[in-house]
Amino acid sequence: QKVSVEVLEHLEHLALVDFRDSEGVQRLQKAIQFADQLHEVNTDGVEPMDSVLEDRWCLYLREDDVTEGSCTKELLENAREKVEEYFVAPPGNIPLPKLEERETFLQGS
Amino acid sequence: LAPWVPVVGLEIHAQISSNSKLFSGSQVQFAAPPNSLVSFFDASLPGTLPVLNRRCVEAAVMTGLALNCSINKKSLFDRKHYFYADLPAGYQITQQRVPIAVNGSLSYSLCIDNKMSQMVTKTVRIKQIQLEQDSGKSLHDDTRSQTLVDLNRAGVGLMEVVMEPDMCCGEEAAAAVRELQLILQTLGSSQAVMAEGQLRVDANVSVHHPGEPYGVRTEVKNINSIRFLAKAVDYEIQRQIEELENGGTILNETRAFDSKLGCTVPMRDKEGKQDYRFMPEPNLPPLILYDAKSLPANMNHQQVINIDWIHERLPDLPSVKREKLVEQYGILPEHSFTLLNEDGLAEFFESVVKQTQMKPKKVIGWILKDLLSYLKQHSLTVKESPVSSFLLADLLNLLEKKEISSTAAKQVLAELWKGEGKTPLEIVKEQKLELLQDQKELEQICQAVIDGQENEVIMMVLG
């Protein structure tokens, strides 16, 4: 089963990933095939498990005390650009260039 | 022309009133220097993990109970993925599969035809309440084509309250939100001040003909007050009706309310349907809550949240407070609404009643007409009133003992309003407003008046 161009475009848009060429797309398809093996197990009537802890141990609850913060300088050290203690970001999400406008693109999908 | 049935649902985000954030120990505070209330986890630095704040869970349980919800003893956390500069992790931790509370209801009241004397009670179903993180704040600098990001708000605990589309107009939506606001403030689970972003409302609006399936809905955001909520909803209903009657179609889109123009406009950056790729939050096991029956014997007290314990300690909700006021003081239901609608007014009223012999049914007139209108004229809150409950009670006692007339009482109140520190009695003496009680003195005055107007008296006697 091949991944359609529409699904590919959708995935690239969501994950901001560029599959770039047919090798990249094939790798994706192989990864999907690998994961699809999960469907070989019959899970009818079985509740999905979200934690190996199940009901044995409830989530640790922290007391509502202020114990962190006040490290503006440290945090801003990671910022390439800053303006008066604000992080600087582009005006909005930069959309991926459309398929037609991209240089390397899978052929004959 | 076939009638249109508008359908309105609401998604309300209430910021939890807590000292620290939902999953980290940084402080929750409204105005602070940018990025000063941010922990490494809030900034999404690698190697950090979420740790759930107990107070936030209690706030959600209280709210769920107050809204008649079933509390899920086991609820789960999920990741909701999308890219935006004020969401450093690239996902928000929320409760999409199994939220903490479901299937509740909220009753609210409306005046029919703007007459307070005709109130009708309506109910809206609460689909669910979920715990989730707030995002940071983006300041758009269009001149320099950049966005400035402040993460102080990132990670603050939110309760998302989802109301089913049981409402049909702006007025109903506004009344429901107002009642929810009062409930949250009474519980203390959220201060719910819309102006400070502690209560944010998104409206889902659609229209259809009776008997036909529901129409395409739009989501309306950027609503900053309860008044604007009513306007935004009513505008959007009208817009959709006009569009459909002109043969157009409604797009399933997100629109922003422009308060200056009083209309809704499509929002940029929200093209196409979002796919949030929900997945279980791998760093958080299920949240388990207990009740009296299921309470574990030998667990650390601090790690246990007992739903029944919280239920027993819920304060009187607004609807109960109103009933008690009506029952205890014999005031009208619509009076109780006004008393609770103004912060501190009910307490002021009760305080005056305690200090005066005047019947509560008469006191309420002075509170709602004279006091409240003064406060409104000068944009003051009850707490800022220059006339204290003690002074007002003092004045009403003079009136009750018939030492002054009610006209005189209004004059004294006007004087008291200046806040010059005089007592009602002092003002009465100063302005000579005492009612004459002496029978003889009254007869003398009347006689003098009659004597002075002989001609008029003869005319009257002759008919």
Image: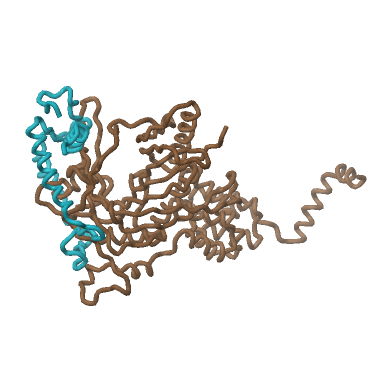
Chain colours: A cyan, B brown
To which quarter of the image does residue A77 belong?
top left
Identity of the residue drawn at 8% across and 34% down: A24
* Residue B228 sits above or below residue B198 on the image: above
Q: Is residue B70 visible?
A: yes
**Looking at the picture, how far across and down is residue A53, in whole percent?**
17, 64
Instruction: Point out residue B234 in the picture as x, y percentages from the top left corner.
Output: 48, 37
State the image coordinates of residue A28 (x, y, percent, origin top left).
11, 39
Give the left or right position of residue B309, taking residue B171 as reference.
left
- Seen in the picture, residue B74 relative to B156 is either above or below; the reply is below
- Vertically, is B299 above or below B249? below
**Which quadrant of the figure contains the C terminus of chain A?**
top left
Name the outermost residue toward the left.
A23
Relative placement, left or right, of B246 versus A66 is right
Identify which residue is drawn at 28% across, 66% down. B289
| Residue A84 in sight from this viewpoint | no
Q: Considering depth in this image, is B326 or B256 the residue closer to the camera? A: B256
Q: Position of residue A62 (x, y in %)?
A: 20, 61
Q: Is residue B234 above or below residue B180?
A: above
The residue lying furthest to the right in this view is: B462
Nearer to me, B87 or B197: B87
